[in-house]
Amino acid sequence: MSAPATTRSRDPRFIVRARADDRCEVCGALGTDWSHRIAASRGGLLIPFNGLWLDRACHNWAHANPDLARAAGIHLPTGADPELEPVWLRPALAWPGWWFLTDWGGYELLRKERPAPVVPACA
Ligand SMILES: [Zn+2]
């Protein structure tokens, strides 16, 4: 028996996938992976502002390039507050830039100039 929709819709991974409209939030390709910004092993919670929806290539890139992933806000150091740390990404319905992630599965624009980081190329 499958889980009722109300249970599924409360799963942060489902919220983040819907937020991303199924696209990788870094490159725009079809997304496949939930990615913690602060790893679960370092206390990162399963909540929408601590997660990104990525494709496998960007997920692998983030793990292979920890300094670049951290500079882009894709990964965060232990103890950071992911709700207060912007991440450079491509929202499904807006422009690439620095965005805060909200607990309800939305985006809030960082209203300060900040250079774009190095991230994988657009799909
Ligand atoms: Zn990607």
Image: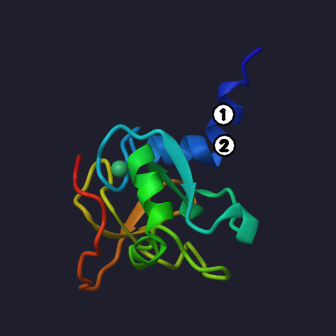
Say what amino acid the circle numbered 1 marks.
Answer: Arg
Q: Position of residue 80 (x, y in %)?
A: 61, 81
Crowdedness near tag 1: few (<14), some (14–19) or many (≥20) residues, C-alpha within 10 Å: few
Mark 1 highlights which residue?
Answer: 8
Residue at image point 51% right, 70% down: 75
Residue contact between numbered discs 2 and 1, judged by CB atoms under 8 Å: yes
Residue at image point 22% right, 59% down: 95
Mark 2 highlights which residue?
Answer: 11
Q: Rounded to the nearest whole Å, what is the CA distance between mark 2 and mark 1?
A: 5 Å
Colour option used: rainbow
Q: Position of residue 85 (x, y in %)?
A: 49, 78
Note whether residue 27 is visible. Answer: yes
Q: Position of residue 122 (x, y in %)?
A: 22, 52
Q: Where 65 sits versus 111, above or below?
A: above
Crowdedness near tag 2: few (<14), some (14–19) or many (≥20) residues, C-alpha within 10 Å: some
Q: Where 76 sits versus 57, above or below?
A: below
Q: Quadrant of the N terminus?
A: top right
Q: Where 94 sits versus 29, above or below?
A: below
Note whether residue 43 is visible. Answer: no
Q: Position of residue 19 (x, y in %)?
A: 44, 47
Say what amino acid the circle numbered 2 marks.
Answer: Asp
